Amino acid sequence: MTVPTSSTSSRTPIGKYLVRAAVRLGRLVRSLETTVLQSSLLASVPLKFRQIGVQIFKLIFVLAVASFALTLAIGMIALWTIAALPIGAPDDEPDVFEMSHPRHRFKYPEMYDDHGSLR
């Protein structure tokens, strides 16, 4: 059982733009690679070494882009984490009805007698 596909694309305009940009970038990289491999300046270097050099250059470029993207992702996660933290300092002082709090008798001494018992 197959589902018929529609004639309209389900991609968003941004997705279409990104796909076109990726295709153009791929074509540009392929043309640059061809230019480098057929360069007259590098004619003295054997073709196999030129191919290896181009592959190493592409690998280094991809690793640089990936490390930059990873750094941005970690930075965004750190910003979101900081934004999720409470703004004010935690209120460590007891309320008047929190008699079991260890600092209650120091904050409300009028509620205690001379021996430290509640009145």
Image: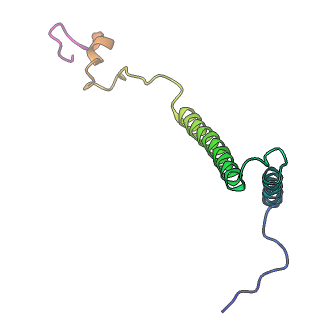
Front in this rendered view, residue 22 or 47? 47
| Numbered disc total | 0
Front in this rendered view, residue 55 or 76? 55
The stretch in magenta equals 112-119
Q: Is residue 70 left or right of residue 117?
A: right
Q: Is residue 88 left or right of residue 71?
A: left
Which picture quadrant has residue 38?
bottom right
Q: Position of residue 2 (x, y in %)?
A: 69, 89
Residue plotted at (27% across, 24% down): 99
Is 4 colored magenta in this rendering? no
**Depicted 99 relative to depicted 6: above or below:** above
Give the residue at the far front of this rendering. Answer: 44
Front in this rendered view, residue 90 or 61? 61
Q: Position of residue 111 (x, y in %)?
A: 27, 14
| Quadrant in which the C terminus appears | top left
Q: Position of residue 71 (x, y in %)?
A: 59, 38
**Depicted 110 relative to depicted 60: above or below:** above
Residue plotted at (78% across, 66% down): 11
